[in-house]
Amino acid sequence: MSRGLFVDPSDAVPLWKQIEENVRRLVASGALKPGATVPSVRDLARELSINPATVAKGYQRLVDAGILAVKRGEGTFVADKPPAPARGERDRELDAGATRYASLALTLGASSEEAVEHVKRRLGVLRRKKEGAAE
């Protein structure tokens, strides 16, 4: 799993939140399918060179949201049927992601049209991957 999971210590977003967002993205894109095993807290912490408590906090939020499930003695897995987020939560997450992306676009001097075009292109790629993963 960690191939698609990364953290940026220089980012203002807390590391546990970056882990949470990355796992959500991998599940939403179909890269992590229901029932897939996720790395243990210790293994992921070692791989990312971060504190295990940081990984545990990100995982716990995903468990609380019903996206991950812990099977005692077996490990942590993607839930069989991860729930769709509630409307308010979905809107907050979209706003947070859009704010980060808009900040990046402004920093790079991209026009609104360029930024929107990149979002559309990436949405298309992710949708095709997800549809391919469902087959």
Image (cartoon, rainbow, N blue to C red):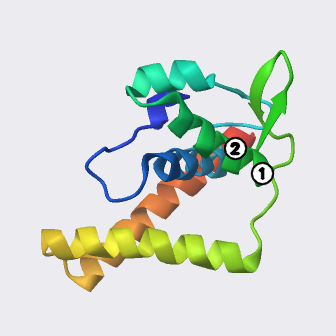
Location of residue 4 in the rendering, given as x and y in whole percent from the top left corner: 47, 36
Please rate how many residues cluster around mark 1, counting C-alpha atoms within 10 Å: few if below 14, some from 14 to 19, many from 20. Answer: few
Q: Residue furthest top?
A: 73
Disc 2, SS = helix
Disc 1, SS = helix
Name the foreground residue: 49 vs 5: 49
Location of residue 45 in the rendering, given as x and y in whole percent from the top left corner: 48, 26
Amino acid tagged 1: Asp
User: Which label number is shown at residue 9?
Assistant: none
Q: Is residue 109 left or right of residue 87?
A: left
Q: Residue at x 13, y 75 (%)?
A: 109
Name the foreground residue: 102 vs 49: 49
Q: Residue at x 52, y 25 (%)?
A: 44
Amino acid tagged 2: Gln
Q: Quadrant of the C terminus?
A: top right
Q: How many marks?
A: 2
Q: Is residue 40 left or right of residue 3?
A: right
Label 2, on which residue?
A: 60
User: Which label number is shown at residue 64?
Assistant: 1
Please rate how many residues cluster around mark 2, counting C-alpha atoms within 10 Å: few if below 14, some from 14 to 19, many from 20. Answer: some
Name the foreground residue: 66 vs 46: 46
Q: Residue at x 51, y 44 (%)?
A: 19
Image quarter of residue 49? top left
Q: Is residue 98 left or right of residue 80?
A: left
Q: Residue at x 36, y 69 (%)?
A: 100
Q: Is residue 131 above or below residue 45?
A: below
Location of residue 76 in the rendering, given as x and y in whole percent from the top left corner: 74, 28
Q: Is residue 131 visible?
A: no
Q: Are marks 2 and 1 in contact (CB under 8 Å)?
A: yes
